[in-house]
Image (spheres, coloured by chain):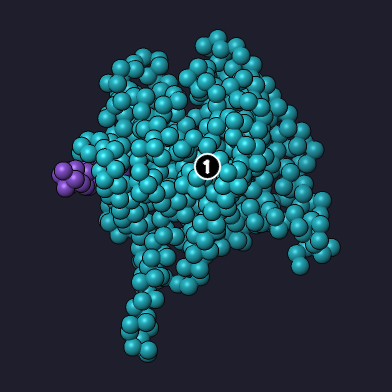
């Protein structure tokens, strides 16, 4: 039986949640300033009102619950879980006031999708959304994408449970020995890519015929969505809008960079290029990306959807990489996945979405480390069966350095993998319950939500059923938290009621 | 906090270069696969 949390614990949790609210207000100020400059008064009003609400909630909470007591492991977990659930409520206010969503639930869905870097959207008339509100939507990707890593490192690294979290992700050490330095490095990587990626996209959109101020706005928004593996797009046609191999090429690099763990970025910045060949996550990701790409291409050729090299490459590869990296950019209309792509190609996309990118990146899904460790474990078991009984085979993998595959790491990886699969299936079943969609459609959408991808076959829509919308919100939340913090929150709530005093 | 020179902007350019190289490698592999599938599909 757990100990019942007392007022001191709740005070610590509330105080830190207040700080998150204040941070969200800061997120709205940049787009609000842009709205004023561009004289987008409706958007300016919505953003200033949203910032005011967030500041009021944040400051009131911090003032009433002010404390200097440090967070422990359980506090940190509960703060993270609640911040990702309640933060989008505050982030939803400007979207709700923008007039481009049908009610507050849609605004919450959009904000959750943005902050968890999912990219599923229920915004209406997206092509006429103001520039400032468009920037705000994409900034939620950047804040959420960088935030989750920082929050996880800052909060958990100080707690006693850090080992559990890192083993679950197949890691046993921080990128750098100091958490502040780690956070600083992550922001440096993001800043570096922000400059280079935006310049690259600026050049690419210019070649696509979008220059000047509009080109800069497109480039910046596309950068946020690509590097943070988000998937929101400035236009309703996503990347298909640009009809540009140059834009797609720059986005491929940014999606690859975004799906790489910051640990791997650190190794590469140190010039350790051998890590690219040896790292278990890189190998796992390369194999699954290429396999799902080939399956999708063969299926598209067999279905007669695309038969030329260019068509198979630009549609098949881009879509699979977009799905696998958790980005969710589309180069084809979502409804075509089911009407023109046959059965096998969408299945390859679903598998790519389900597997996801690297742990410790902004990508969602099961993660390459878990896939890699599970595959290694399978090979290990086969070797154990085939070798003489007295033999004790040792299986190793490379992640920063050579490591021995041990049972706790495999067990943690397998458990999370199973939880993802169950979440994918649960969401699909909820969709099926409505009797309006086939299992392929509901599974596609469910995996897209829980793996924080953003590709859609059309179920996600402003007119979607409320219970299904709430299901997808919870799936995006669970997928981003990778279950541990969410379960800890449930345990915390139970201990509030039934805990030992 | 002191800035670690090992992860300064020069190192960043090298890191970005390696990411671009990795992206190019996987893109070329996918392009080769697309060409193969296209030829075999005729």
Locate residue A475, reporting x and y percent.
58, 47
Locate residue B23, reporting x and y percent.
28, 43
Q: State the residue lying farthest toward the front.
A: A435
| Residue found 48% across the figure and 73% down from its top | A407
Of residue A386 and residue A469, the one placed in the foreground of this image is A469
| Residue found 37% across the figure and 19% down from its top | A215
The reply, left or right, for residue A181 in relation to residue A284 is: right
Observer able to see residue A270: no
Which quarter of the picture shows residue A91?
Answer: top right
Count of numbered circles in the view: 1
Q: Quadrant of the C terminus of chain A?
A: bottom right
Q: Taking B6 as reference, is A33 above or below it?
A: above
Q: State the residue lying farthest toward the right.
A: A501
Which quarter of the picture shows residue A258?
Answer: top left
Q: Colour of chain B?
A: purple
Locate residue A81, reporting x and y percent.
64, 48
Of residue A8 and residue A497, the one placed in the foreground of this image is A497
Q: Taking A329 as reference, is A431 above or below it?
A: below
Q: What secondary structure is found at the residue carrying circle 1?
A: loop
Find disc 1 in the rendering and name its residue.
Answer: A437
């Amino acid at each position: 039986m757990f100990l019942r949390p007392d007022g001191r614990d709740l005070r610590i949790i509330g105080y830190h949640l207040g700080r998150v609210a204040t941070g969200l207000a800061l997120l709205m100020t940049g787009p609000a300033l842009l709205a004023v400059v561009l004289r987008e008064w409706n958007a300016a009003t919505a953003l200033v009102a949203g910032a005011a609400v967030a500041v009021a909630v944040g400051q009131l909470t911090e003032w009433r619950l002010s404390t200097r007591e440090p967070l422990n492991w359980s506090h940190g977990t509960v703060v993270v879980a609640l911040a990702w659930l309640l933060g989008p409520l505050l982030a939803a206010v400007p979207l709700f006031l923008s007039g481009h969503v049908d009610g507050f639930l849609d605004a919450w869905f959009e904000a959750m999708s943005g902050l968890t870097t999912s990219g599923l959207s229920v915004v209406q008339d997206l092509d006429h959304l103001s520039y400032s509100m468009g920037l705000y939507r994409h900034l939620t990707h950047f804040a959420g994408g960088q935030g989750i890593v920082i929050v996880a490192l800052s909060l958990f690294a100080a707690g006693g449970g850090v080992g559990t979290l890192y083993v679950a992700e197949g890691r046993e050490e921080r990128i750098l020995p100091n958490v502040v330095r780690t956070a600083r490095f992550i922001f440096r990587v993001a800043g570096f890519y922000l400059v280079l990626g935006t310049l690259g996209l600026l050049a690419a959109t210019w070649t696509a015929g979008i220059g000047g101020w509009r080109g800069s706005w497109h480039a910046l928004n596309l950068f946020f969505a690509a590097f943070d593996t988000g998937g929101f797009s400035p236009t309703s046609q996503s990347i298909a809008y640009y009809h540009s191999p140059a834009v797609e090429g720059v986005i491929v690099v940014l999606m690859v960079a975004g799906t790489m763990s910051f640990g791997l970025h650190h190794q590469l910045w140190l010039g350790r290029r051998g890590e690219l060949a040896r790292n278990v996550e890189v190998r796992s990701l390369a194999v699954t990306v290429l396999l799902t790409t080939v399956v999708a291409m063969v299926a598209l050729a067999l279905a007669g959807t695309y038969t030329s090299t260019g068509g198979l490459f630009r549609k098949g590869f881009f879509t699979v990489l977009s799905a696998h990296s958790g980005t969710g950019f589309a180069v084809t209309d979502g409804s075509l996945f089911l009407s023109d792509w046959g059965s096998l190609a969408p299945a390859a996309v679903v598998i790519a979405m389900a597997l996801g990118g690297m742990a410790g990146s902004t990508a969602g899904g099961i993660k390459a480390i878990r896939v890699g460790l599970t595959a290694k474990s399978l090979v290990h078991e086969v070797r154990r069966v085939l070798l003489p009984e007295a033999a004790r085979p040792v299986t190793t993998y490379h992640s920063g350095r050579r490591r021995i595959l041990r049972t706790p790491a495999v067990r943690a990886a397998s458990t999370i993998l199973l939880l993802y699969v169950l979440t994918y299936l649960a969401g699909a079943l909820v969709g099926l319950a409505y009797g309006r969609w086939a299992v392929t459609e509901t599974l596609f959408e469910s995996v897209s939500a829980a793996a924080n991808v953003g590709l859609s076959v059309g179920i996600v829509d402003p007119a979607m059923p409320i219970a299904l919308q709430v299901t997808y919100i919870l799936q995006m939340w669970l997928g981003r938290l990778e279950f541990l913090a969410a379960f800890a929150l449930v345990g915390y709530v139970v201990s509030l009621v039934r805990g030992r005093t | 906090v002191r800035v670690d020179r090992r992860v300064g902007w020069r190192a960043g350019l090298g890191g970005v270069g390696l990411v671009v190289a990795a992206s190019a490698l996987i893109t070329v592999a996918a392009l080769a696969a697309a060409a193969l599938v296209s030829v075999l599909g005729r």
